[in-house]
Each structure stands twice: as C-alpha cells, then as structure tokens.
Amino acid sequence: MTRLAFVVRAETEATVLLATQLPAAFSGGRIRYRTRTGALARVAGAVVGAFDAKHDSLFLGAEAANAELTLEVERRSLPIAGLPAGDGLRWRYLLAIAAETAARFALIDRLPDPLVTGAAASEVVPAANVAAVGHAHLDVAWLWAYSDTRRKALRTFATAVQQLDRAPYFRFAQSQPQLWAFVESADPALFARAVAHARGGRIDASVAALWVEPDANVPSGESLLRQLACAARYAESTIGVRPTVAWLPDTFGFPATLPTLLAHAGVPHFATTKLQWNDTTRFPHARFVWRGPDGEQVTGALLAAYGGDVTEPRLAAARERDEPLVVGYGDGGGGVTDAQIAALAPRARFTGIGSWMESIARDAVLPVVAGELYLETHRGTLTTHHDVKAANAALERALDEAEEAAAWCVAVRLAPANVEPLARDLQTAWRLVLRGQFHDVLAGTSTALAYTEVREDHERAMRIALRVRDAARSLLPRVRFGEHLPDQLPPRVAPTIVDDRFRFDNGIVRAGAFSDGSLRDLAGTAGPSLVERANRIVAFHDTPKAWDAWNLDRGYERKPIRVHERGATIDDDALVVHLQIGRSPATMEVELREGEPWLRVRLVVDWHEERTIVRVQNRLAIRAEHALFGQPHGSLARPLYPSTAAERARFEVAGQRFASIADGERGLALLTSDLYGWSALGTDTGADLGLSLLRAPRWPDPTADRGETALAYALVPHDAAPVSALEAAWRAYALAPRVRLFEPDGDRVLVTATKPADDGDGVIVRVRECDGIAGTVRMRCGGRVREVLAVDGCERAIAGSASIDGERLVFGLAAFGLRAFRVRF
C-alpha cells in the first residue's frame, strides 16, 4: 500500500484544490480517499471520477503513471441521509459539523476491481432476477444553493461515467437537463463522455423530460409545457435522446390536467414515488393509466422509492411489485456504489425507466385513473414563501406579453436579424424561470442561501422580458401591431357611510363592509347578497408536527389568533382598514372601480410572526355541491361535502387564478394572481371558501415570508359563469390589456400562448377549450397567414388538420382540448 501526500494548490470559500504526483511506477490500482463532503478527481486535468461519503475508492489504469492527480475538495456538506424533518438539536448539530478539513493524503493498493469481477457474474443472470436502475436523485436547490448543486452534479456524473466505462452491464438513469447543462458548462470533456453513453443507451435519459423536476401545482400550464419543451429541445439536440418519461419522484402533488399537458408534449409516461407519503389513504395502484379531462392519457407508475441500498427486503419488494429496484445515493451521494453494482450483477438486469414503462404500457391491462393525484401531506407548500411564488407568477405574465410582442414582429415580417435576438433572449429568460420552478424552490422549502440565487435569477429574467417587450414594440410599425394598450385602471367609485357601515355600488357590483374590511353584503346590482360574511382576515397557530415549511396539519383552525381592528377610513375613494395580527401591522384597501364587475382587495402586511398562518375566509350564502378551481391549463371541480377519507384529507387544496362556487343561477368567484392554497367546505346554509395568504415557518428558512408583503385578490359576483367567463374575468383582472395577434370567435376557446417558434420558423399559437364543448374553431389572425401546421407542445409537426379561411384559421378542438399550430406569414 502506497501513501500519497497532497499539497494545497488553491483555495476558495467553497473548495480546496489538492495536488500530488502519481508514482512513475504506477501500474494501475485503487486510490482510496476519505471525504464526507465530496471531491472531484482529475488526472492530468481530465476528470476521472469523484469521492464522497459513499465512494472512497477510484480505480485508475497504468496510463495514469507519473501524472498529476488533483482533488477539488468541498469544504462543507450536509449528510445525504438522516436529515431531520424540522429545526432542533439534530439540525443544529448537522450544521455545526458540516464543515470538513480536507484530508491531505490518499492510499494506493492493488485490490481487484469489483466491477470487473461483476462482469463475469453478470453473464449468467438467474431467471428469478429483478430489473435494476442506477440513479442519483439530485435536488437542483434545497438545503443548498445552485452553486453547490453544480459541484454535486459534476461529481455524480464523474462517478457514473467511470463506472459505465468499467462495467458494460451497468445502466444509469439521469433526469433534469438542467443538471446536464451544469456539467456541460463546467467540463465539456466529461459531458461529451456522458453524452456518448446516453446515445449508446447506457445513461438512460428517457427520464429527462422536464427541465427540472418542478412543482406541478403552482406553475402555469404554459410553464409546465415550457419545462417539457425546453427539456425536449436540449435532450434531442445536445444529448441525442428523446425523453419519454415525466420523472417526478419527489413533487408535491399533481394536477388533473397534467396528462393533457404531457400528451400534448409527446411524453407518454409518468412516474413518481411521492404518493407513498400520503397521510390518510393509500393510493391503490402501482401502475395505471392516467386520463386528462380532454381524454388524453399517459401510463403512470407509483414506484416504491427513487434510490437506496441493495437489501434483501428491497429486492423482495421489487419482485413482489414487479418493478425496477432503483438504487443509488442522491443529493451529493454520488449515485450507485461499486459494491451495489457488483452485488446486483448476478441477481438483476440493469434496465432503463423508459423501456420498462414502454413494456408495461404495451403488455398490461391497467386501471384508469382520472382527476388530480392529490398528495395528502405538504399542504403548506401552496403558501410558503409568497415572494417567490409572486415573482414566478409575475414572470409568467411578463414573458407572455413579451412573447406576443415578438410574435407580432414575425407576423409583420420584420427582418430575422431583428427578431432572432428577441427569441434567443426569451429562451434565456425562460430557462431562468424554469430552474426556479424546481419543487423545493417554488414550494418555499429551500434555505435562505438558495433564495438569494433564485431572486437574482428572477430579477435577471424580468429585465430580459421587459427589454424584449420594449424592443419589439419599438420595431413595430403601427399601434395596432402588438402595441400595449393603455392600462391605467378606471377611477374608483367612493364608498359611502350609512349607519356606520361602508357601502360600495358602481351599478354592476354592490357591497357593504364592516370597519374590519369584512363584507356583510356582496352581490350584483339586483338580488340578495351572496355572502353571509366575506373578506374576513383570520389567523391561526400553524405548528406542524414535522416538515415546518412543508406541512399544514389537520385541525390548525382550532387554534385561532385574534386579529385586532385598528380603525377604518375612506382615503382616496377606497376603504382603508388597519389591522394588527400579533406583532404585525396590516393595511387593507377595499376598492370598487367604474365598469369593473369585481371588488378589489389589497392587503399589505409587515410580517413579523412565527408559525402563524393568515387566511381570508368567505362564508357564502350559496348552496352548491362543488367548488370550481383553476388548474394549469384547465379547471377542476371538488366536492363541498366530502364523503370519503380521501376527500376529507383535502382540507387545503391547490388552485390557481380563480375559485368559484355557484348554485346554477348565481355564484361568487375569487380571482388572484399569485395565491395557490384554498379550502372549500359546504355548510348548513351555504359554503365556506378560504384562501391562504401568508405563513411563517422557522425551518429550513427562518426568514420565509418575513417583512413587508403585498397580497391582492378580487371578489366577483356572477350568474353561474362557465369556466370560459371566469378565465376571461381573470385575464381582465390580472393581465395588462394589449392587441392580440390571434382572437378566437366566441368565448369558450382561449389563446394560451403566442410566441416566435423556437427554431425561428414562424409563430406558435396554442389554444385550449374551456367549457367541455367540442367543435370547430374559427380564429382571426392579425397578420396575413400563408400556412398553418399542427404541432405538439414541443413544436414538432404532428398529424392534425387546420385550414385558412381569409383572415381566420379554422380547426377542430376537442372538449377541454389543447392544440398548437405553427403559423407562417
């Protein structure tokens, strides 16, 4: 055994670079180096592998003789297992010992390579084997920042590539093109080796169907489609593989519309493990067909786990469930160990997730599931870190506006030299936004350090979006081509005071408010009030037993905190209410404007609480069976009177844009731009509709939601409006007015995206049907259309007809359907 001594070559805040010279007589062997934090190994400047807490050995050939060996050792790292579910002594202890002084020596010995031994054993695999998948789940940010993840990704790829080089029977699955892009920018040579293995089928990139593993409840439908499109474009052009599996093992619940979005993007399969976390019921199917509201469907799998060791219980469970055993350590653990590969060689066959899902889709008769896949835990993620959710939503709106302005430039046939830079900038901005939609980031469950980088990304993306919008407008020749219409709000209608109550009436909406801002009366101009008491700000102790930023425990509403009224005035034609929530002052503005069919509410809170949730509660005088909620590119009705354990477990549910309760003749909706956690429950006299506004968890980010926060929503009386009318109302409330390039005839079809094609060939327009009515759509275009072709969500040509009739596109659209077209001018 030979001892190698290292010298310090360089140091940064994050890493120490160690160097040594391998012996001239080195004839190949094992290098052993112990590190808890992780170290990237290079020989003569080329990456040869990595060390971490699970990988202390690296096998090198004789060609390394007399070459320089360097180790880039990370200074700090949390363990990859055994992390707590909340703040406390263990968490503080782990933080205290996270730092490591890099060892200054390594050992060389001549033990045989276990993967070479395993190669012989793998030639005879017994009939009773299981399928195995090597994997390393890697959170793009969580208890660490993006900069840490870049190093973790580089080490993980380095370990996998050298194992694939040594063991021809091994296969490794790697999701998230963002991680591939990190490696591509950090070390092109290592990236090229990984791409070669992917193109040879050894690295399974079938699971790289989304740019990151995003939250699925908060991003807009268009954001989720861009996750798919950006991933497909990168995977096909750079990795050389077309992904087929939406690999979302750790995402916190899945909307009913996700099968529609996946099918639209040409992704036929979906896999998760997270439903194993349900706290009330057990999801009944390991494999299933998941059907969207438009009838499109994908093959789904609920796997037992997305990583771990090779143990007899895990092997037995994989056989019993007839599913692949996913092995390996993630989040910096380096993936699969040599010992795991060698142990599986005589007992299992390594496979790919995509090929396995193709086999079950082909060979099995599967149960059909429709509707959302609700996760019965982590309900607080719909509210935590409102600032991050609000920034994401603002970027979704800004990019939508910028894309349409750039599309107008294409439609009026401006020179490509003017348009192409705009399209490139838009793609850059989208990548920043998509990275920030990683599930632990957008859910609000990362550390303050991670959010420092996220905010920088959001600010940069917003600068790009505004620059593209303004540049496109400056290029357009006339006001009707994509110009931004005046967006000044109409004047307020001042409330009057009658019997110490504040009354609003603009001829469309009438309301009566108490001095705490709550409403005793809200309706259209005719008919009885739709509310018993609405717009009531309430607060509760929010002390989940575990997973502080993640969970909202059942029964939290039994621990109220009094909200104190501090006076109300009429100021600048709005009702201004002052409230006190614990130590936190809040100011509410309630306003009604000329011609608007809703009552606007804005709440500004200087938030200093801990473990407290603030909500707005609305007791409606409307008896109905269901509440309707917006979902990504769709909507979902949920029962107001739960009758099963699974329905009762949904005491906090996901919704975006709007929620509405109606009795067939009249209804009330809430509109919001960036709030996502709702409750809806029937009562003896009507229904309670609640919306979560702020939380104050202490872990993992004790600063989450603290400071000044602005929240806004609107209450809309309506005559049992269909989804299309609710969507139109939300757009009028949330989006700046502008001249649209495409306008469908009629109200039931929405244009959800108008953008320059990613390849520079024309404009992509996407539409969806809102009300469940199939039929032919006629859609006016503001440019002179030469050709229209059907495409999927990734802008690839697909079968499907569309025609041109004068200035209109004509095409068929299924009930709740989603279609996209490439339009050339």
Image: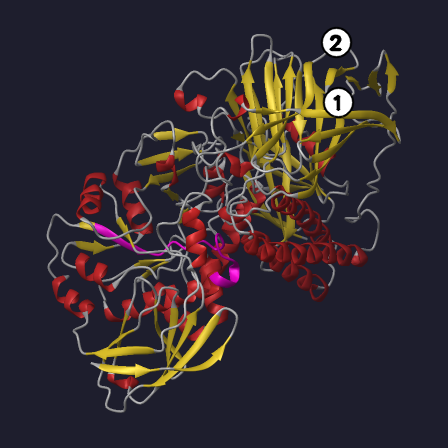
Closest to the observer, 555 or 430: 555
Residue 183: quadrant of the picture: bottom left
For badge 1, the amino acid type reads: Asp
Q: Which mark is residue 527?
A: 2
Q: Quadrant of the N terminus?
A: bottom left
Assess whether residue 411 is covered by the magenta stretch: no
Q: Report the number of numbered marks.
A: 2
Label 2 or label 1, whichever comes before in sequence order: 1
Q: Is 597 placed left or right of 115 in the picture?
A: right
Asked which secondary structure carries label 1, the reply is loop
Above or below for 610 versus 237: above
The residue carrying mark 1 is 516
Q: Quadrant of residue 414?
A: bottom right
**Residue 794 visible to the viewer:** no
Q: Nearer the viewer, mark 2 or mark 1?
A: 1
Q: Which residues are magenta?
A: 131-148
Q: Position of residue 351 (x, y in %)?
A: 26, 54
Helix, strand or loop at mark 2: loop
Would residue 123 be visible to someone looking at this image?
Answer: yes
Please tell me the numbered disc located at residue 780.
Answer: none
Q: Nearer the viewer, residue 618 or 344?
A: 618
> In the displayed image of the protein, which residue is found farthest to the bottom?
24
Give the class, few, some or many, for how many residues have Cα within 10 Å of label 2's Cα (few <14, many ≥20): few
Q: Are marks 2 and 1 in contact (CB under 8 Å)?
A: no
> Residue at 61% across / 19% down in the picture?
661
Give amino acid for label 2.
Answer: Gly
Residue 604 vertical placement versus 355 (above, below): above
Q: Position of residue 395 (x, y in %)?
A: 66, 48
- Where residue 71 sits: x, y (%)? 39, 76
Residue drawn where x is 49% and y is 60% of the image? 234
